[in-house]
Amino acid sequence: MNSIGSTERGFVPSWLLMAALFGLLGVGFGAFAAHALQGSLEPKALGWVETASDYWLAHAPLLLGLSLLLARRPSRAFLLSAWSVALGGMLFSGSLVVMALSGVTALAWITPLGGVLLLLGWGCLAAGAVRVRH
């Protein structure tokens, strides 16, 4: 294992696992919202679950790509991107689901924090891409 976190075989299993988890959560909560939660949640809360699902699904391919990038071109920018996306996605989408299902809206401050981390993840990917070009 090198200092960036890839294995000798080339994959970073934790990022691959996180990509799979995001896909699983996105599909699972999307189906849950479309079928089991219809009529049992207020429209606003149902929208939160749908948004959470959309964000998990949107970021699953990014984490998959980052796992491949880290295997082929390890860099601190790509590693920071992966950490930011993973943590940001869990905070953003996770807080939305918890608020929707529990009604505890005191967690609302976590959602934008997760969003900022997602933005940071995309920014770090861009920074890493610029460095690869040069």
Image: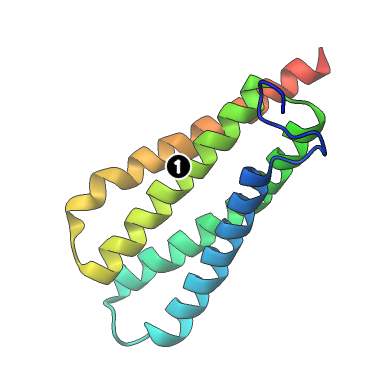
Q: Can you tell which quarter of the image residue 44 is in?
A: bottom left
Q: Residue at x 57, y 66 (%)?
A: 24
The residue sitting at 45% across, 79% down in the picture is: 32
Which residue shows up at 35% across the image and 38% down it?
113
Q: Examine the image and state in which quarter residue 124 appears.
A: top right
Which quadrant does the C terminus fall into? top right
Q: Position of residue 41 (x, y in %)?
A: 28, 79
Q: Residue furthest top?
A: 134
Up-down relation of residue 11 to residue 55 (above or below): above
Quarter location, residue 43? bottom left
Looking at the picture, how far across and down is residue 102, in whole percent? Answer: 22, 68
Q: Position of residue 71 (x, y in %)?
A: 77, 34
Secondary element at image label 1: helix
Name the residue tied to disc 1.
88
Q: How is the image coloured?
A: rainbow
On the picture, is 109 further left or further right than 28? left
Q: Nearer the viewer, residue 42 or 108?
A: 108
Category of crowding for the residue at label 1, using alpha-carbon neighbours closer than 10 angstroms: few (below 14), some (14–19), many (at least 20): many
Q: Is residue 47 left or right of residue 107?
A: right
Q: Is residue 20 above or below residue 65?
A: below
Identity of the residue drawn at 41% across and 86% down: 36
Number of marks: 1
Mark 1: amino acid: Gly
Q: Is residue 3 left or right of residue 8?
A: left
Q: Quadrant of the N terminus?
A: top right
The answer to whether residue 120 is left or right of residue 124 is left
